[in-house]
Image (cartoon, rainbow, N blue to C red):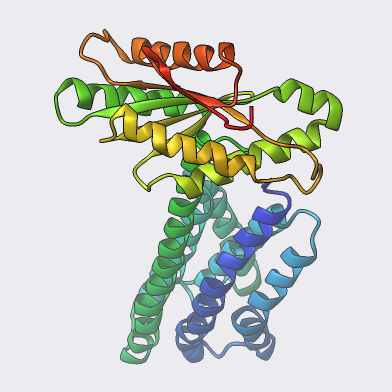
């Protein structure tokens, strides 16, 4: 999704919890440093707003914005301005200042890398300048025990919260990566392997067979008269027939069998550890079962298949020759009247439909 829409709101949601935790416990860190300075009441009101109200307001601003991502980035810069402001307001008390500014820097790097870190740094400087204009310059290097204890929750809990958010994000990224990997190797209509990925699998199986690790058979499947189906019934019916075939393939094959859409109305299957005779029985059963299936969009339509099979042979020079043998068997099945299974090199074993 575009950053301006769904992903922007997701970004704001990821920032929301760390901001609530960080600014909430940061309140006590800053308050412990301000307490000895006889700070004006309005400063305490501003600190309460920043620590406990601003996180919720920032999220609502992002949620209601037409561009949540940009709004949230602006809110992060406001966080940095506040951070710089409080650093100068507490006269740069060393431990609270380093704690607050380090947490702000972590946010900026996590949100936008080094470029956004640089912007956040300028925002912190702006906040410091504003505070020094209001309160005047000052420096308080000493950190007492109260200030030390007030900073400990910030140093412990905030990195944990940010780490948890980063962990959840890495899990989501891994899931998205897996989804993209799956999409790149599957056909969008049938959810079977696409042409390119199936050809890669065929090459791998050929190497296994060449190494003597197994026997395997390749099947090429063609929907009979598919062009006529599209012409007479429309492409919606044609697509439904393709899905019916893919679903029947999934039901008919073993988990280790690899089915793909070779292109258009042609499908392809690799059957590992299966000689052609046994593969012929599987394909014949598929042909018969699909002949009983009807598309709900065209109940009168009878679906038939022509199937060509080729077992691995040591005389095949590469996977292309193996596939060519299956293609020749498929051509023979069509020549013999369609609606049948033919094994390469043995047209006599073609199995016609008893009703054809």
Task: Using the image, determine if residue 295 lies above or below residue 193.
Answer: below
- Which image quadrant is residue 80 in? bottom right
Q: Is residue 237 left or right of residue 145?
A: right
- Which image quadrant is residue 11 in? bottom right
Residue at the image position 43 percent from the left and 26 percent from the top: 219
Task: Using the image, determine if residue 80 lies above or below residue 274.
Answer: below
Residue at the image position 84 percent from the left and 31 percent from the top: 234
> In front: 326, or 179?
326
- Which image quadrant is residue 347 in? top left
For the view shown, which residue lies furthest in the front direction? Answer: 354
Task: Tell me if I can see residue 316 in this picture.
Answer: yes
Quarter that holds the C terminus: top right
Task: Using the image, determine if residue 324 lies above or below residue 43.
Answer: above
Residue 13 place in picture, x, y as percent:
61, 67
Q: Is residue 211 left or right of residue 113?
A: left
Residue 89 place in picture, x, y as percent:
55, 75
> In front: 83, or 159?
159
Residue 294 place in picture, x, y as percent:
71, 45
> In front: 210, or 50?
210
Q: Is residue 286 left or right of residue 203?
A: right
Residue at the image position 46 percent from the left and 66 percent from the top: 165
Residue 145 place in picture, x, y as percent:
31, 90
> In front: 145, or 331?
331
The mark total stands at: 0
Task: Tell me if I can see residue 102 in this picture.
Answer: no
């Amino acid at each position: 999704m575009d950053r301006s829409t769904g992903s922007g709101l997701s970004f704001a949601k990821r920032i929301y919890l760390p901001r609530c935790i960080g600014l909430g416990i940061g309140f006590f860190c800053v308050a412990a440093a301000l307490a000895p300075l006889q700070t004006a009441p309005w400063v305490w009101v501003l600190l309460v707003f920043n620590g406990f109200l601003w996180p919720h307001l920032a999220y609502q601003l992002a949620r209601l914005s037409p561009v949540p991502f940009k709004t949230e980035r602006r809110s992060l810069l406001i966080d940095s301005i506040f951070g710089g402001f409080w650093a100068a307001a507490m006269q740069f008390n060393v431990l609270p200042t380093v704690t607050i500014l380090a947490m702000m820097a972590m946010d900026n790097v996590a949100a936008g890398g080094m470029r956004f870190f640089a912007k956040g740094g300028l925002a912190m400087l702006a906040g410091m300048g504003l505070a020094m204009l209001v309160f005047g310059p000052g420096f308080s290097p000493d950190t007492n025990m109260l200030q030390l204890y007030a900073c400990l929750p910030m140093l412990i809990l905030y990195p944990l919260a940010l780490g948890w958010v980063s962990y959840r994000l890495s899990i989501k990224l891994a899931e998205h990566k897996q989804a993209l990997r799956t999409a790149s190797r599957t056909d969008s209509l049938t959810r079977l392997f696409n042409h390119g990925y199936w050809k890669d699998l065929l090459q791998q199986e050929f190497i296994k067979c060449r190494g003597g690790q197994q026997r395997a058979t390749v099947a090429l499947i063609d929907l009979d008269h598919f062009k006529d189906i599209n012409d007479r019934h429309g492409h919606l019916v044609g697509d439904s027939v393709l899905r019916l075939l893919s679903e029947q393939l999934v039901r008919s094959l073993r988990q280790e069998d690899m089915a793909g859409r070779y292109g258009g109305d042609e499908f392809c299957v690799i059957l590992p550890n299966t000689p052609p005779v046994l593969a012929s029985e599987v394909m014949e059963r598929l042909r018969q079962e699909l002949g009983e299936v009807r598309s709900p969009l065209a109940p009168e339509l009878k679906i038939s298949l022509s199937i060509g099979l080729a077992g691995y042979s040591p005389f095949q020079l590469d996977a292309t020759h193996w596939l060519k043998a299956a293609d020749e068997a498929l051509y023979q099945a069509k020549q013999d009247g369609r609606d049948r299974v033919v094994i390469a090199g043995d047209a006599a074993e073609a199995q016609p439909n008893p009703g054809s």
